[in-house]
């Protein structure tokens, strides 16, 4: 008997996590293939710390995908996914090892779309010449060179996001029973807050100034609104006391020049360094599909399943319900996908599998000098929790999470979140 074939599109956090969870819960009842254009996992969250500490992030934040998946008997194909036909249940792809390869197609019984988003730096005029970011190794190393090799002359710094164009695909879902997935104007602002706080420490440690040199911007009414009003209020109070400048309601970034950043809202702010987080766009091959919303994000219910095509799942940043675009929400979704597919092939009871997504913003952000902030909040989605802590223990947690992730080859222990909550919130 041929086993059901699960094809997972994308092999970073959500793709690798979903594949591993499917194997854990469905066992050998399924064949699993993961397709990604690159053969390594890019561990994004710790890039800011490596950059400011002047270490090459490639040395510690890269994990080999094929050998990791092989441990669980999961096939890997290094290829560019070019199409998904949800009626014929096929995926088309072009092998990516060498340019010029021919296209192939592969049939699936279940598909998990976990391709993340396209970070649209190329839509910001002047970014190539005057912009910086920490979203990948290349840009991280470019900023590292500027900061540590004398390129930066000590001028003002702006850290902020472009406007995010969220789709309409999560309008009807109700997490926490009566909650919602709100409309957001920035895709993910934890990195903005993290970069601002840790950059201020870096300036002080290098006798180049302090928080007063930094302007934090947001396209929205308030920054990091997903963390909840109470948390944001405390964060803004602390940032104000440290001397940060703060500009909200900027709308989109219009252009970067050598000396300034200009916004749709009319603000023009002087900046030698501009650390930017762009629009998080859905990939072209997803746009216009019957499973996608008006911007190309994959529509799912809270069991991460497309309502019209029940053999199609999504996890991570490409799913319409993932707001903000945060790895910790993707992590919850991998667990759900694993259980759903196990139930679909008779390896788990529906009662055990059908726990819906109740998103939690869980964020550990570096502040420099071995300190970090910790946020655990679900109030934005209709939940009751808003926790914020500062201190060394949170930095320890951030670094040990990375260590555990690499040590466990992408699998973190089931007690990890409970331990983190205890260490950050309970232990006095
Ligand atoms: C600077 C920064 C800091 C962050 N810090 C945190 C943090 O502290 N905590 C947190 O929870 N989140 C954080 N995030 C968010 C987190 O990185 C993302 O939510 C997470 O990476 C999403 O995982 P994903 O697997 O859905 O998407 P991605 O990580 O984007 O992975 C998508 C994968 O799909 C592959 N792919 C895409 N298209 C194709 C195609 N057509 N064919 C083949 N392969 C394809 C890509 O190569 C990639 O490997 C941060 C983000 C940034 C930018």
Image (spheres, rainbow, N blue to C red):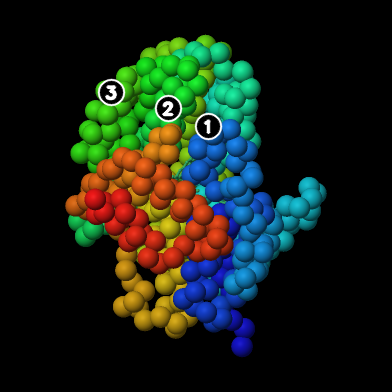
Q: For the residue carrying disc 2, how many other residues have a C-alpha within 10 Å: few (<14), some (14-19), or many (20+)?
A: many
Mark closer to the chain start, 3 or 1? 1
Q: Position of residue 56 (x, y in %)?
A: 63, 38
| Between discs 2 and 1, the one toward the N terminus | 1
Q: Position of residue 307 (x, y in %)?
A: 39, 63
Residue at the (33%, 36%) spot, across then down: 224
* Quadrant of the image occupied by residue 250: top left
Whether pointer 2 and pointer 3 mark residues with C-beta atoms closer than 8 Å, the reply is no
Residue occupying the point 38% across, 24% down = 216
Residue 270, quarter of the rendered image: top left
Against 381, is 53 above or below?
A: above
Look at the image and tell me whether residue 116 can be seen: yes
Q: Nearer the viewer, residue 399 or 67?
A: 399
**Residue 201: assigned label:** 2
Mark 2 vs mark 3: which is more N-terminal? Answer: 2
Mark 2 in CB contact with mark 1 (< 8 angstroms): yes
Numbered label attached to residue 177: none
Q: Which residue is mark 3?
A: 240
Q: Nearer the viewer, mark 2 or mark 3?
A: 2
Q: Nearer the viewer, residue 77 or 423?
A: 423
Is disc 1 surrounded by few (<14), some (14 to 19) or many (20+) residues within 10 Å?
many
* Mark 3 → mark 1, Cα distance in angstroms: 22 Å
Image x and y of residue 352, in percent: 34, 77
Residues at marks 2 and 1, CA–CA distance in whole angstroms:
10 Å
Label 1: state its secondary structure.
helix
Residue wearing tag 1: 52
Q: Is residue 277 above or below residue 78?
A: above
Q: Residue furthest front?
A: 428
Element marked by disc 2: helix
């Amino acid at each position: 008997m041929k086993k059901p074939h699960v094809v997972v599109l994308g092999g970073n956090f959500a793709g690798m996590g979903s594949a591993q969870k499917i194997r854990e819960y469905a066992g050998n009842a399924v064949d699993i293939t993961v397709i990604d254009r690159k053969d390594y996992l890019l561990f994004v969250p710790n890039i800011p710390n490596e950059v400011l500490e002047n270490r090459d992030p490639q040395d510690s934040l890269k994990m080999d995908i094929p050998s990791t998946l092989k441990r669980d008997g999961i096939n890997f194909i290094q290829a560019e996914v070019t199409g998904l036909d949800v009626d014929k249940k096929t995926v088309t792809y072009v092998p990516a090892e060498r340019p010029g390869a021919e296209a192939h197609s592969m049939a699936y019984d279940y598909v998990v779309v976990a391709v993340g988003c396209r970070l649209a730096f190329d839509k910001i005029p002047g970014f190539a010449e005057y912009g910086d970011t920490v979203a990948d190794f290349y840009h991280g190393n470019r900023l590292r060179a500027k900061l540590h090799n004398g390129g930066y002359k000590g001028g003002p710094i702006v850290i902020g996001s472009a406007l995010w164009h969220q789709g309409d695909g999560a309008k009807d879902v109700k997490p926490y029973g009566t909650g919602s997935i709100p409309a957001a104007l920035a895709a993910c602002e934890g990195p903005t807050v993290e970069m601002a706080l840790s950059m201020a420490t870096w300036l002080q440690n290098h006798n180049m100034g302090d928080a007063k040199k930094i302007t934090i911007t947001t396209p929205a009414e308030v920054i990091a609104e997903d963390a909840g009003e109470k948390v944001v209020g405390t964060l803004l109070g602390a940032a104000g006391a440290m001397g940060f400048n703060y500009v909200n309601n900027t709308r989109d970034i219009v252009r970067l020049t050598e000396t300034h950043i200009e916004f749709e809202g009319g603000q023009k702010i002087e900046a030698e360094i501009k650390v930017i987080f762009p629009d998080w766009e859905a990939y072209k091959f997803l746009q216009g599909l019957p499973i996608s919303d008006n911007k190309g994000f994959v529509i799912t219910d809270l069991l991460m399943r497309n309502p019209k095509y029940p053999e199609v799942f999504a996890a991570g940043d490409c799913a319409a319900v993932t707001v903000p675009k945060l790895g910790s929400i993707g992590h919850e979704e991998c667990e759900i996908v694993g259980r759903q597919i196990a139930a679909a092939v008779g390896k788990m009871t529906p009662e055990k599998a059908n726990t819906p997504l109740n998103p939690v913003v869980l964020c550990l952000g570096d502040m420099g000098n071995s300190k970090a902030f910790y946020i655990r909040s679900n109030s934005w989605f209709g939940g009751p929790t808003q926790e914020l802590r500062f201190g060394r223990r949170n930095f320890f947690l951030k670094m040990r999470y990375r260590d555990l992730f690499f040590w466990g080859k992408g699998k973190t222990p089931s007690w990890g979140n409970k331990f983190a909550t205890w260490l950050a919130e309970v232990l006095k």
